Image (cartoon, rainbow, N blue to C red):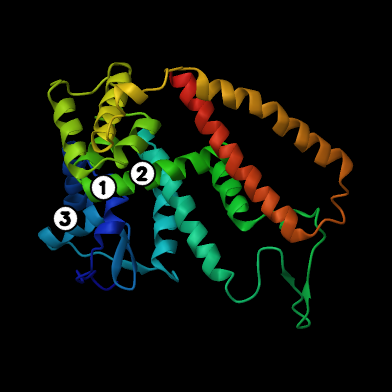
Amino acid sequence: MEPKSTPTLKIDSDFRNLIRPLSKKEYRQLEENLLSDGCLDPIIVWNGVIVDGHNRYEICKRHNIGFEVYEMDFESREEVFAWICAHQLGRRNITEETRKFLIGMQYESQKIVNSRKNTDGKNQFTVTDKDSDTSIEPAPDEEEYIPSGHRTAQRIAMENNVTFSTVQKYAIYTRALELLGKKAPDLVPKILSGRYKISHSNVVELSRLTPEQIAKVSRRIEEMQQPFVQYKKTRSELQDICESLSSETVPAPSIKNMPVFDPDAEVTGLTLTIPSWGSLIERTRTKTNLGIVSKQAKYKLAEAFADLQGKITDMLSAIKED
């Protein structure tokens, strides 16, 4: 058997940031194992860029330990993101915050991959007959009719034992953390590690603030001088801070024009509107022959329902938090 070599590989910070960092104890244990037994698992790469095995690569290069390289075939960076997320979600030692972020990132990345694969004129509804050049359109009630984005969410939901709407909610959480990372890079690792217990809604609110405002929130949290910020204690406080900072850029109305404040107004209005939605949905379901409705119309309705379902889930979560 030929001795293993130590080739020089490339590191992509975006790929590496998706992988949970090892604790000092875990890193030392990995180093001892590599020095004792060698590198038993190959470093997984894509076009010479490390996809999995960053810590092993770093230790092996430092101690001149030979290792094998396994090249994977991906068509885009988004495919790599989706693979890393799925691989990391299989690990047990990740925080709930990291799990939510990875599920959201996997969904967002896979949606991009699917959209690119559908640019050749075929879509998620088309089944190709290999014996001819004819495309066979399945019946509207067949499983293939489900929009690809929805099918992706359903697949990821099943793999991670969550609901379809939860996957979409986590995607919002992921986008908020990515935006937050551009404004305050040091804050995101503290959230993902579980050091800062910040609710979904507060993460979204934080991401909308300016870098200076986010820095104020971070300093406020640090002033508590606790190794772990308690969720119950910070939930309302963070909400108050976010709201006060958001209002800094909005001129306050004069006392003369100040409307009478009704804290129940928005919720009451929404509550009175919802029954009409239910009546309209039931009427459409019972009086419409869906078998003759166009696929495009049903596709748009399915998308609208999925979006509404996600918003309802977010609202129910907000109600429960309060």
**According to the image, label 3 marks what residue?**
59
Residue 166 horizontal/vertical position (percent): 52, 37
Precedes in sequence: disc 2 or disc 1? 2
Marker count (numbered): 3
Residue 179 horizontal/vertical position (percent): 31, 48
As measured in the structure, the alpha-carbon distance from the residue carrying label 3 to the one carrying label 2 is 34 Å
Q: Residues within 10 Å of mark 2 (few under 14, many from 20)?
A: many
Decide if residue 193 is in sight here. no
> Residue shown at 86%/46% (left/top)?
288
Quick check: 25 left or right of 267?
left
Quadrant in which residue 62 is drawn: bottom left
Element carrying mark 2: helix
Q: Are marks 3 and 2 in contact (CB under 8 Å)?
A: no
Q: Residues within 10 Å of mark 1 (few under 14, many from 20)?
A: some
As shown in the figure, which amino acid type bears the numbered disc 1?
Gly
Q: Are marks 3 and 1 in contact (CB under 8 Å)?
A: no
Precedes in sequence: disc 3 or disc 1? 3
Precedes in sequence: disc 3 or disc 2? 3
As shown in the figure, which amino acid type bears the numbered disc 2?
Ala
Where, quadrant-wise, is the N terminus in this rendering? bottom left
Vertical placement of residue 165 versus 113, above or below: above
Where, quadrant-wise, is the C terminus in this rendering? top left
Which numbered marker is on residue 154? none
Frontmost of labels 3 and 2 is 2
Residue 114 horizontal/vertical position (percent): 55, 63
Element carrying mark 3: helix
**According to the image, label 1 marks what residue?**
181
Vertical placement of residue 36 versus 127, above or below: above
Quadrant in which residue 251 is drawn: top left
Quick check: 289 left or right of 264?
right
**According to the image, label 2 marks what residue?**
176
Element carrying mark 1: helix
